[in-house]
Amino acid sequence: MNLYEIKNLVKVYGEKENKVHALNGVSINIPRGKFVVVLGASGSGKSTLLNILGGMDTPTEGEIFFDGENISKHTQSKLTKFRKENIGYVFQSYNLLPNLTALENVEFSTEIGKLPKDGAKNALTMVGLFERKDHYPAELSGGEQQRISIARAIAKKPKVLLCDEPTGALDYKTGIMILNVLCDINKKQSTSIILITHSQDIAKIADVVIKMRSGKIIDVFENPAPQSPNEVEW
Amino acid sequence: MKIENKLLLRKIKKQFTQLLAAALIVAIGVGFFVTLKTVLFQYENMSEQYYKHYSLADYTIYSVGLDQSDVDKIKHIDGVNAAQGRFVADFKSGAATIRALSIPFKESLINKPYIYQGRHLENDDECMLLQKYAKANNLEIGDTIEIKIQNQKYVFKIAGLVSSPEYVYLVQSESVPMADAHDFGITFISENFFKSRLNSGYNQINVLFDDGADTAKIAEKIKEALIPKRISYDLFKSGQTSYKMYKDDLKQIDTLAYIFPVIFFIIGSMMIYVMQKRNVTKERKQIGIIKAMGLSDIKILFIYTKYSVLIAFLGSIGGCLLSISIGDYILNVFGEMFEIPGLAFTFYFYLWAVAFLLSLIVCVISNFVGIKAILKITPAEAMHAEKPKSGKKILLENIKPLWNSLSFNTRYALKASLRNKGRFFAVVLGMTAAVALTVFALGFNNSFDYLINNHYETFTKYDLAVSVQTTPLEKDIDVVSMPGVEKYSKATILPIKVEKDSKNLDYPLLITESGFDMLDIKNDTGKAVNLQDGIVLPIYIADKLGVSKGDKVKISSPSSSFDDVEVSISDLSIQASSFYVYTKFDFIKEKLNFDKAIYNTIFLKSNGDVKGLSKLINDSKSVISTTSKEQDKSTMLKLLDTISFMIQVIIVFAVILGIAVLYAVGIINLTARSYEFVVLKVMGYDTKDIVLACIKENLFQLILSLPFGFLLGNLIILGIKDEFSNDSFALTLHIYGESYWFAAILLIAISALIMIMSIRFINRVDMIEGLKSREE
């Protein structure tokens, strides 16, 4: 069974003359356990798609099935539960809570998911930042903050990790490091990863690439030989 | 500790002063409520116990020549629980007036004295003295007092210091409801003394009714049983002056217990609303992240609600501690006015619980209104910065010539101040409340001060009012020819009942000679009232009876044997105190078919030495007692002294309120607009100009707040003036100009203080950091 089955998804923002079609009839199946990259330029609809996949937003029309369950008609409380149980987010601007230390940011995620606190420590170790656990976000570099953000996302053992341009705010070297962490998670934990980017080069590491333009999918292809992040350059 | 609580605690640490400011406002509201309600409950409980255990009479008959057989007749009437006769009269003791009450050697049944020190009477030459009078005159157990009775001096040894349920307030007469304990006292002397030395019977019979008895019916039976004896007048407990004042007090305290907390709770809730709305705006992205992580809306609301619960909790604890610290002091202040044995501040758990519950409800509701936006935003929306609100034209912009004539700085100040209406009106509301409280506190004092000064300086023209033995009008007594008397007027004061339809009121009737000028009795046109045919009623009494000039009322006086005599109201007088029903000897003599007129009071004007004249008069055989205008005035002014503490407390709270609101909302305003300040600075706008715009904004708020504050202060006094009016005086609104000035200057000073804080903030704004922090 596919992780996601998306049928004719439409998302319209605004009303009357101000209507903007962010998604315009998107249909696709996303396989489980794969590293999927959604590729598109700014305004192509990739972030909207990611938000709807993660239950952060609802479609105007169409259906999304996650593990066979139609989530497009979910109420806000059901979507909250869905996010809590299934989704891990990694944002471009990290979005760590500034008043919490690195460990507390990760623990918050396990606390919401009612999981053991050890998970948080393990996740921090996995991203190689356990020794920085008592630091506040403002005391960490961008790369470190993004690794904490990844640790926060994986600590609750989500079925899928949704990454919104996770290297967008980072320098090349740090970006490679982050992509390595994500690939590791995908391989070692078999966690599905959906990453959105505008970089053709980053798409080379994906198992599946979905190309978008003007709210529509224009191409979908499987990468016969995904590259290691270390081989990628941008 | 849960992470969400850590988040909350760290936020509190950052916003501690704001949280404290809001909690302080709630604390003052709770403090007022708990203190005044505790005072009220304690006063009521202790008084009712005192009245019950010391058997305050339910009913009293006043007459002359009563004896034990009369008492026995009353005792046998169904519904009468107990009856006891006594002799009561005012005598002189040096310069003071002493009211002597006879009491049996065995324990009294009714109106029992409460013995603080010493013991009950055992001998004729002993007395029990009111403790208040003893303290004021430095008298102790074992000391002696000398009382002049029927021109003979008797010395009594003080056996006990007491209080009396009849004299919770030291009422000397209707016109002197709170006598100065230095000049007026109560003493209990043995019944045997009056019988054996003075051969006097009783002039009062006190009665206690059975519980649930039909008091009006029993009173009628009592009066029938005493026929043919002439009853001067009768009085139910509800009509007893001290008891009436106690009941009025309960109403007054209860009114105040609601007015102040309501003001502070409104301001507190406005502050919480503004603070939390701002928090949600500022933490919009954080809310989005938490939502994205799967925390439900309800749980997020709950996290924010904990903040307001903490304010309610701190406010309630603070308010209750405040109540403990000032409660005793306030009771001591009240203790200057009335005397209840054992009255002390106490702990009413349920009152504290109610106060906490009330503040919790207020805080949580205002919190919810402030944070309800959390429910509306989806996590995806919350991740992006909020779209800037589009600017709106303000009213003034439509008046183009005026608007265009304003400088950019003024236009910016006006538009900036109205951009966030919630915060703008929170400041205006806080300022208005601070001004209103100050105007109320000072205005309340002014109104009393005006009442006293106007009454004693303008209305009262005499120096001494001398109560004398009843004498035919045509006959002069020695008093009028004493050296120092400039002029005098004879008059009769007798208790009457004025009746119109189902309403009836007991007031003294003042019968005067033609040309009476010892009181400046004027009507509402400012002219002297017409004392020709009929009676003149003070407007205060006329309003209570629902009558006006020209109407007819019935008057009755058992002591003067006239009943239900119909008279017309010839005029209405404007006065704030000493409520008499006025008429002339000629009219009353003709109307009631009296053979001859008598008088029992002389109003005197001295040509200089009032004290010397008073001393001389007190030595006269015909004189029962004297009261002087200056003495009465100083007693009333002492009442002002006692309320001055309350006035100071209210002003301090008004200042705290002003500072707290302006500080908390000011901080929010400044941090929310730091981006805007930075942009202005980057564009090259001078810091001085930004400060100038802020000052203009502040002025705009001041201009709005001052008139509303003045108005609200006036309205509060108008709203409670009836509660603070009684049969002795009617409070009217009169606020002196300097009170308005004081309130305005106080607010300007508070604003200036907060302005200094704003200037420091604007000067410190970091352009680089500020550009990153766009929030609204």
Image (cartoon, coloured by chain):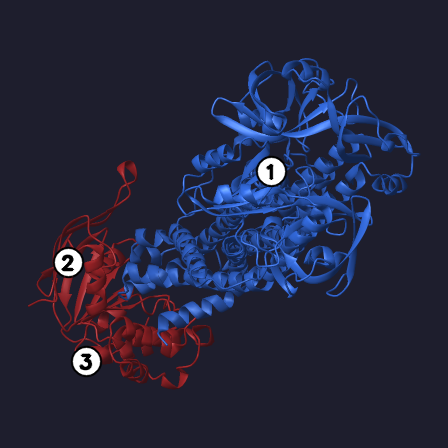
**Amino acid type, callout 2:** Ile
What amino acid is found at the position of numbered circle 1 in the picture? Tyr
* Residue appearing at x 59%, y 64% in the figure: B325
Which is in the foreground here, disc 2 or disc 3?
2
Spot occupied by residue B339 in the image (x, y as percentages of width and height): 62, 54
Q: Residue at x 28, y 79 (%)?
A: A181
Taking the image as shown, residue B633 lies to the left or right of residue A140, namely right
Label 2 and label 3: CA atoms lie apart by 25 Å
Check the image and report above or below for B614 versus A227. Answer: above
Which element carries disc 3, helix, strand or loop? Answer: loop
Instruction: Tell me: B620 left or right of A6.
Output: right
In the depicted structure, whether residue B617 falls above or below residue A1:
above
Q: Which of marks 2 and 1 is in front?
A: 1
Residue, x 54% and y 24% (percent of image)?
A: B499
Residue B579 x, y percent position in the rendering: 66, 31
- Residue B113, percent from left and from top: 60, 56
Give the Cα distance between marks 1 and 3.
Answer: 102 Å
Residue B158, placed above or below residue B430: below
Q: Residue A71 carries which label?
A: 2
Q: Which chain carries label 2?
A: A
The residue positioned farthest toward the right in the image shown: B483
Q: Where is residue B289 in the image (x, y as percent from the top left)?
A: 33, 64
Q: The red chain is which one?
A: A
Mark 2: few/some/many CA within 10 Å (<14, 14-19, 20+): many
